[in-house]
Amino acid sequence: MAPPALAETARRLIRRTRSGVLATSLPAHGSTPSTPFASLVTAAAAPDLAPLLWLSALARHSRNLARDPRCSLLLAGSPAGSNPQTAPRVTVIGTARESEDAALLARWHALNPYAASYSGLTDFSLWRISIEGVHAVAGFAAAAQLDPAVLVPDPAVAGQLATAEPAILAHCNTDHAAAMDAIAAGAGGSGSGWRIVALDTDGFDLARGEGLLRIDFTKPVQSPGAVRAELVRLARAVRQSPG
């Protein structure tokens, strides 16, 4: 059984990583069998942890997925030094399907603010990858296959938070703007005007222009009330910090 710390590393990596390598299958051609095709994509995570991709219909990987939805997505963190093998990374194996969920599309754009300049292009569509298998690596010689059940949040909890999210975001950004700036400063963000743009069981995301900060909770939350308690704790902690 994989250690809990590895599952936590994998889950947080999926939540915070914005770019990855998508592997799809090129179609067979004549005597040439179907072969793997890897491409760079920009990702976000749905409340239930499923990776979200916003892909152009003109891209080869989109055409590949339309023919064969099986795929894998590699997401990697930063190495601890010069050895790239020390980087934490996770490969999500699953099936990609197009989604017309407006809330998920809004979430992808909120977590990838740089894309606002071409958000209206009509040849793009949202794809959601169901998590059917996970291979996680915490660093050199620390790897394991993870059961998706140990990663994904309870569907009822994820749904409850998704329902409460708009009200929590509006309240924080309207009534507690200074607290959002303080939390951002505590995480290394500069300037004012930081807004909370997404939340989930594991943490939340702050944005300012095209800048984005991921803030992790101390542990996964189980209710909207627990989200509010974590936000209050974080705001108090950074205000009481000598720095």
Image (cartoon, rainbow, N blue to C red):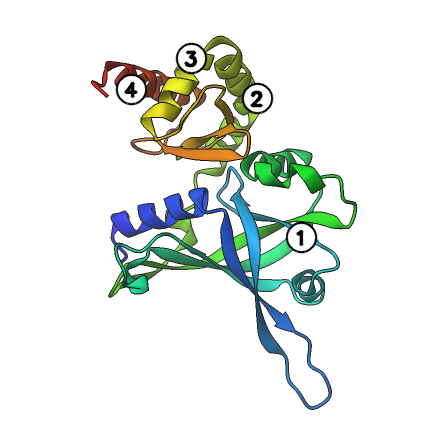
Badge 2 or badge 1: first in the primary sequence:
1
Check the image and name the residue furthest to the left.
Answer: 242
Q: Position of residue 210 (x, y in %)?
A: 54, 34
> Which residue, given by chain and number where applicable, does mark 2 sit on?
166
> Which residue, given by chain and number where applicable, does mark 3 sit on?
178
The residues bearing labels 2 and 4 have C-alpha atoms spaced at a distance of 24 Å
Q: Position of residue 7 (x, y in %)?
A: 33, 50
Q: Nearer the viewer, residue 237 or 226?
A: 237
Check disc 2: other Cα within 10 Å, few if <14, some if 14-19, many if 20+: few
- Which residue does the image show at 49% across and 34% down from the upper left? 211
The residues bearing labels 1 and 3 have C-alpha atoms spaced at a distance of 36 Å
Badge 1 or badge 4: first in the primary sequence:
1
Check disc 4: other Cα within 10 Å, few if <14, some if 14-19, many if 20+: some
Badge 4 or badge 3: first in the primary sequence:
3
The residues bearing labels 2 and 1 have C-alpha atoms spaced at a distance of 25 Å
Q: Nearer the viewer, residue 65 or 116?
A: 116
Q: Amino acid at mark 1?
A: Leu
Q: Nearer the viewer, residue 112 or 171?
A: 112
Q: Is residue 201 visible?
A: no
Q: Are marks 2 and 1 in contact (CB under 8 Å)?
A: no
Q: Secondary structure at mark 3?
A: helix
